[in-house]
Amino acid sequence: MEFHYELIPTDFGSRVLIIRRQAPLVSFQIWVRAGSKYEKPGITGISHMLEHMMFKGSQNYGPQEHAKRVQELGGEFNAFTSHDKTVYFENIAPHYLEEIIKMEADRFLRPSFASEEFLREKEVVMEERKLRTDNSPYGKAEEELFALAFQAHPYHWPIIGWASDIENFSRDGLLEYFRLRYTPANSFFVLCGHVPEDALSLLEKYFKGWEGGRVQDPPLPSEPEQKGNRRSEMIMDVKLPFVFMGFVTPGYCHRDFVLLSIIDRVLTEGESSRLWQSLVHRKGLAIKAGGGIYPMGDYSLFFFYGVSSGKGTLENLEQALVEEITDYKLRPPEMEKARNQVLAETVSSLERAYYTGLSAGEGLLNCGEPETFLHQLEQLRRAKEEEVLEVWRRYLREGRRNTVLVRGEE
């Protein structure tokens, strides 16, 4: 597929990635190097908290006024925080782009962070954590799996943060983190779709005066090579016990990342996958089974799960999962089916300007190359069976397994 872009420095010290294509909308995105891996004990979750506060008003717009205006213009908007970044976006008709840039500049340069809004939003985040993690067996087990798999790297702690840290957030601490990380040199813009010719000049007009250099982060600790299986058992209020299992695998830019996506499809994708067919249909040990890959910049986590049917013990289900994960074989139709699934879904998603912008932004953020996703597609097309099998044996093997067993209360 054709992919043309311009990566242009701005007068105020940031960069803008412009991808022009035939589309009814323009996707406007701001990528900030502010994610959970840049945090430390005591302020875990502050990147996510800051994302919430960015919707709580600025000098010229009241709380939620920005969001209300985007909706009035018929646009889409949101933001998300991950391990490696925070991204803000609007998908809007091109003739409204100037108003969007003006509003974004106001909250990036002049956020209000009112004390009463801060205290109210801290309670909102605490409730979000309770709902998604503390009161969710699956959320709690996922958090435990990450903590088990990552012993040294800050992927160890959750994006939403530990509850004790959220409770102790201060407005002054939030402001300090904002001033450190929300700088032009620590951020970049992505505009994809029907991009107006004056987009760059509009950015320079409204973001003029935004100051701050690139954060000089100390090197993050590397995750030591795992030398043995790790496991954790949890007792929770669940009717059906389940198993979570994970393996630390290479990050987004590594050449093995694409090959792992083929293995992912073979083992976990839908009811035709090996895990479902074996654990649910043939052995009857699970009512559902699957998994996936959490793609991150420095490492990824390849995870699997099985929810017990009540037939056999939880250990029987765990062993059956291990047997399928370590059955290093590709049957004749599996390789092509998996390859075609990934290719088709990727190409289909890239028909939308928003997803093309996200893909290019991910490449620029993590690999320094917006076209990384094109290299991955080409690698996927050329992948050979023996390459996939070699990667499978290297990463999904004995001694690298992390397991969380969740049992019901007696």
Image (spheres, rainbow, N blue to C red):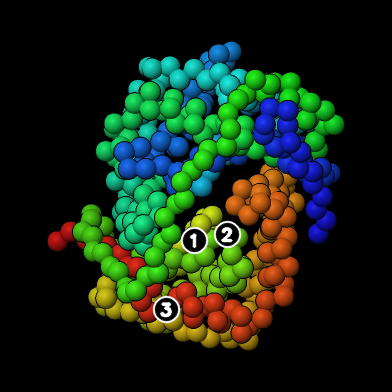
- The foreground one among 179 and 356 is 179
Q: CA distance from mark 2 to mark 3?
A: 20 Å
Disc 3 marks which amino acid?
Arg
- The foreground one among 54 and 180 is 180
Q: CA distance from mark 3 to mark 1?
A: 16 Å
Asked if the residue at tag 3 contacts the one at tag 2, i.e. Cβ–Cβ closer than 8 Å, the answer is: no
Residue 205: give x, y in percent of width and height.
74, 21
Residue 165 visible in rendering: yes
| Residue carrying label 3 | 397
Which mark is first along the chain, 1 or 3?
A: 1
- For disc 1, the neighbor class at 10 Å (few under 14, some 14 to 19, many from 20) is some
Q: CA distance from mark 1 to mark 2?
A: 7 Å
Disc 1 marks which amino acid?
Ser
From the viewer's perspective, tell me whether residue 244 is left or right of residue 34: left
Asked if the residue at tag 2 contacts the one at tag 1, i.e. Cβ–Cβ closer than 8 Å, the answer is: yes
| Residue carrying label 2 | 252
- Residue visible at 43% across and 16% down in the picture: 114
- For disc 2, the neighbor class at 10 Å (few under 14, some 14 to 19, many from 20) is many
- Residue visible at 44% across and 25% down in the picture: 175
- Quadrant where the N terminus sits is bottom right
- Residue visible at 44% across and 65% down in the picture: 248
- For disc 3, the neighbor class at 10 Å (few under 14, some 14 to 19, many from 20) is some
Q: Which mark is residue 300?
A: 1
At mark 2, the secondary structure is loop
From the viewer's perspective, tell me whether residue 118 is left or right of residue 18: left
At mark 1, the secondary structure is strand
Quarter of the rendering containing residue 117: top left
Which mark is first along the chain, 2 or 1?
A: 2
Disc 2 marks which amino acid?
Tyr
- The foreground one among 116 and 376 is 376
